[in-house]
Image (cartoon, helix red, strand yellow):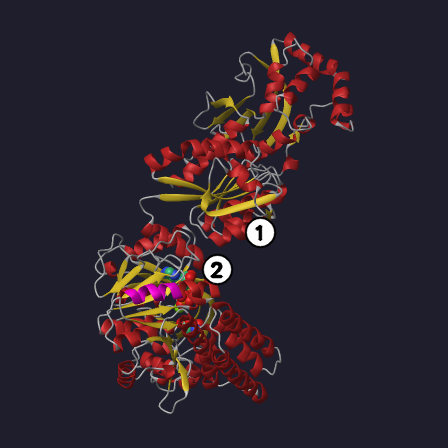
């Protein structure tokens, strides 16, 4: 005998129910089975909602009732069980539900007992419809309402099973019923026949109860995922399914809230040594997860990670607790009397405080109960009023190997620290099966992901990239990455994935990764319109550790989101100068935020593309050197113009050529007015520790007044032609003195300026060619001869290469 349980997700639609019926027919060919079924997906929640509305006196409950009727009648119509008898029985059940809800509405009162009765209709309807539908396919199926057999106490909402009576009932019922039984999950009844429920997600438990009573060979829990996974796949995209685990591990994994399998299901299975297999209704060939007494050897040191999204932490503290025996006994007895389940307890060795976690909806009740119990101690100031902290989550790292394996806690905390997640409380069960950590709710996902990465993805590190602005630089970057993918994976175990991309119109995402050589059509065919706020939300939704946002735009708008992005634990790499050349305050804030959040903010390509200018400056200052003076030609565009301006051609002609070659901004005045150079100089000055603003930099605008005023680019070129003599004259003067013209930025004694200068042959800037950048740093260590870095400092390829290098730096850190 095998017991098969189909969860709400497996019976959410008539199409899915068809799949379930097929699985049932196939399983029957293999041997004897019994089937337990949940309410149709979402129905239990709707029943609860309708009950609450009715109790509040809101007639809106009727709309939900109509919806519920529709769902069940529609499914019946589609699945084909016809005949007036079936429809009549269905209407009978639905009418009864309507009557009870009306009672709640009239009385404005909803007891846990009535709620259980109302919730039971979900399973009663689904099991009935499934049995009738199977009959139309010539399967001799019978509806079995478990509340007749499963006997419980009267703790409505989470009733406890009386196994003696239940086992006896089940055994004698099955002895007299040879047909296939379609059993309602989740429900039972008291001695006096009142319907109870076994707790949310309790159908798994029902399956285990029947399996134990019938001495079944196996329980199969059919759901919508490939078994128990290493973490909740909705929160951790890299989670994968676990082939086998022990009952204890499964219990610890499912302990927190309703996950894949209800923890109580393990008790009867364990007692009777019945294996439980979790399988995917939508992927039947997959073996899923086998839960048994002994699991296969685990290739990892932990088995999985689970979490509880919402808990409250209560702290009882006071000087009067020190060394006084019996306080915790009284405290927890008080909570037990109030039926409050304690999820986690920690106590510092000072015994000065006890901290424990409970469900948030019980927090006030708990406080009241404790303050009543200890009111004398509180009056005497021996114990302080109870402190409640909310918006917290618990993460549990689970696995049998943890016993006796040192360093697991350390690795867990290290992972959290690396991603800037703050640990609020820690508890380890003495079984060492579980380390539980309390974190802020906002950090739940990143904490889960970073721990998951540490324990399950060790041999390979995945970097998750999000790129906005796949223009020239961004496009080249993706090409370069594409060429190196294999090499990085092979030599550095580094995997790069492009999980999101956006231009000004559209954005596109893929959790598994967008092909680096195929993003163009992928983005073009995306139906998501670009909005930065939504782009950020999508990144947040993925929750990948080692996520990097690549801003390849030159936009101020994107910069506005940097703080939010860093706060999400996502690093930023950008050639966009806007962030660091706006206010000093913002520059500092972003840098400090990145440090605080444990992420990177790299902008080496802000100055000199891939030339190692900023990194060298940082290395020098970090190692204690002092920057005395910086001289630099830092604009590739202007460098090209003056390096080409040797007297053989007119100035305007050269500017024309620069524009034609794509070296200039669309309006070359944006280069020639010196602002771009000033921004770079500003960033360099700030990197050397000078707290300055753009307005503090003295900039010589290269253009005569009339050229600046021209109303269009064409007019500007006209005006520039008129002034060719002006530039020719400057050049002649320089030549006469054996010099050349260079547009040089200087930082000295906390001041920065940009000006056109004539330099002689002995000057390191005399011999520059093409679009070369150069920087000469005079420092305490490089006093006699400055440290010089020179090379092409503009162009999409070298800029992209600089960004790529920063990506790899993050990968290797
Ligand atoms: P059913 O309706 O079949 O009872 P549930 O919704 O109760 O299904 O449980 C299945 C869901 O549990 C999955 O869709 C998945 O999102 C979630 N889940 C949470 N944690 C895990 C985990 N560690 N492994 C697999 N699924 C998990
Ligand atoms: N239908 C119940 C619930 O939603 C029981 C179950 O699905 O297991 O909680
Ligand atoms: Mg479930």
Name the secondary structure under disc 2.
helix
The tag on residue 442 is: 2
Residue 676: x and y in percent read 62, 31
Badge 1 residue CB within 8 Å of ligand 1? no
> Relative to the observer, which residue lies in front, 743 or 136?
136
Name the secondary structure under disc 1.
helix
The tag on residue 63 is: none
Could you tell whether 508 is left or right of 154 in the image? Answer: right
Residue 169 is covered by the magenta coloring? no
Image point 47% across, 37% down: which residue?
Answer: 516
Please identify the quarter of the rendering in which residue 201 is found: bottom left
Could you tell whether 581 is left or right of 442 in the image? Answer: right
Q: Earlier in the sequence, mark 1 or mark 2?
A: 2
Q: Are marks 1 and 2 in contact (CB under 8 Å)?
A: no
Q: Is residue 546 above or below residue 367?
A: above
The tag on residue 534 is: 1
Residue 450: x and y in percent read 39, 52
The C terminus lies in quadrant: top left
Q: Is residue 73 above or below residue 421?
A: below
Residue 30: x and y in percent read 27, 64
- Specify start and end residues of the magenta stretch as a single range: 21-29
Q: Is residue 258 visible?
A: no
Badge 2 residue CB within 8 Å of ligand 1? no
């Amino acid at each position: 005998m095998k017991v098969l349980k189909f969860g709400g997700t497996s019976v959410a639609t008539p199409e899915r129910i068809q799949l379930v019926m097929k699985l049932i027919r196939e399983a029957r060919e293999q041997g004897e089975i019994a089937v337990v079924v949940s309410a149709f997906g979402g129905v239990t929640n709707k029943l609860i909602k309708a009950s609450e509305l009715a109790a509040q006196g809101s007639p809106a409950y009727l709309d939900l009732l109509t919806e519920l009727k529709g769902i069940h009648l529609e499914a019946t119509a589609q699945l084909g069980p016809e005949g007036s008898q079936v429809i009549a029985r269905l209407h009978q059940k639905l009418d009864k539900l309507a009557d009870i809800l009306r009672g709640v509405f009239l009385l404005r009162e909803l007891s846990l007992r009535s709620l259980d009765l109302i919730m039971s209709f979900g399973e009663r309807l689904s099991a009935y419809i499934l049995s009738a539908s199977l009959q139309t396919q010539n399967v001799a199926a019978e509806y079995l309402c478990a509340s007749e057999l499963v006997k419980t106490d009267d703790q409505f909402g989470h009733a406890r099973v009386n196994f003696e009576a239940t086992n006896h009932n089940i055994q004698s019922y099955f002895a007299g019923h040879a047909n296939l039984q379609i059993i309602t999950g989740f429900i039972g009844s008291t001695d006096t026949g009142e319907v109870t429920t076994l707790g949310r997600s309790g159908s798994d438990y029902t399956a285990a109860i029947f399996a134990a009573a019938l001495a079944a060979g196996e329980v199969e829990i059919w759901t919508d995922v490939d078994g128990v996974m290493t973490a909740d796949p909705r929160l951790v995209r890299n989670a994968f399914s676990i082939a086998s685990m022990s009952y204890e591990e499964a219990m610890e994994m499912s302990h927190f809230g309703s996950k894949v399998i209800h923890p109580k299901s393990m008790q009867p299975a364990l007692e009777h040594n019945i294996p439980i297999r979790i399988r995917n209704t939508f992927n039947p060939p997959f073996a899923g997860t086998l839960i048994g007494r002994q699991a296969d050897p685990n290739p990892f040191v932990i088995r999985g990670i689970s979490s509880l999204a919402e808990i409250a932490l209560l702290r009882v503290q006071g000087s009067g607790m020190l060394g006084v025996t019996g306080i915790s006994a009284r405290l927890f007895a008080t909570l037990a009397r109030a039926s409050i389940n304690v999820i986690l307890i920690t106590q510092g060795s000072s015994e000065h405080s006890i901290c424990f976690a409970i469900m948030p909806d019980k927090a006030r009740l708990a406080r009241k109960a404790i303050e009543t119990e200890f009111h004398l101690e509180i009056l005497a100031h021996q114990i302080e009023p109870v402190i409640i902290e909310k918006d917290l989550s618990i993460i549990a790292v689970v696995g049998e190997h943890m016993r006796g394996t040192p360093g697991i806690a350390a690795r867990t905390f290290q992972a959290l620290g690396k991603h800037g997640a703050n640990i609020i409380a820690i508890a380890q069960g003495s079984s060492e099966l579980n380390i539980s950590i309390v974190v802020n709710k906002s950090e739940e996902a990143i904490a889960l992901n970073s721990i998951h990465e540490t324990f399950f993805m060790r041999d390979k590190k995945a970097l998750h990239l999000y790129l906005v602005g796949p223009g020239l630089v961004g496009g080249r970057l993706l090409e370069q990455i594409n060429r190196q993918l294999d090499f990085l994976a092979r030599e550095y175990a580094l995997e790069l994935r492009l999980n999101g991309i956006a231009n000004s119109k559209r954005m596109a995402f893929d959790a598994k990764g967008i092909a680096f050589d195929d993003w163009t059509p992928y983005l073009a065919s995306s139906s998501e319109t670009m909005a930065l706020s939504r782009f950020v939300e999508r990144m947040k939704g993925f929750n990948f550790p080692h996520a990097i946002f690549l801003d390849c735009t030159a936009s101020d708008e994107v910069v506005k989101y940097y703080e939010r992005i860093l706060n999400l634990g996502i690093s930023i790499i950008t050639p966009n100068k806007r962030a660091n050349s706006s206010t000093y305050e913002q520059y500092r804030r972003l840098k400090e935020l990145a440090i605080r959040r444990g992420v990177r903010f790299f902008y080496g390509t802000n100055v000199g593309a891939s030339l190692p200018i900023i990194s060298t400056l940082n290395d020098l200052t970090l190692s204690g050197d002092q920057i005395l003076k910086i001289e630099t030609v830092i604009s590739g565009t202007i460098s090209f113009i003056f390096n080409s301006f040797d007297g053989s051609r007119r100035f305007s002609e050269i500017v024309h050529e620069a524009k034609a070659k794509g070296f200039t901004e669309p309006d070359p005045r944006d280069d020639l007015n010196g602002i771009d150079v000033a921004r770079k100089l500003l960033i360099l000055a700030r990197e050397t520790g000078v707290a300055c603003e753009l307005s503090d930099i003295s900039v010589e605008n290269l253009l005569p007044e009339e050229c600046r005023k021209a109303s269009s680019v064409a007019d500007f070129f006209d005006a520039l032609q008129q002034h060719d003599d002006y530039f020719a004259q400057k050049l002649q003067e320089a030549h006469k003195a054996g010099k050349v013209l260079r547009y040089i930025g200087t930082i000295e004694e906390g001041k920065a300026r940009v000006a056109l200068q004539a330099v002689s042959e002995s000057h390191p800037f005399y011999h520059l060619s093409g679009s070369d950048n150069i920087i000469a740093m005079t420092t305490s260590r490089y006093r006699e001869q400055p440290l010089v870095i020179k090379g092409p400092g503009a162009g999409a390829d070298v800029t992209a290469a600089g960004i790529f290098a920063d990506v790899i730096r993050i990968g290797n850190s």
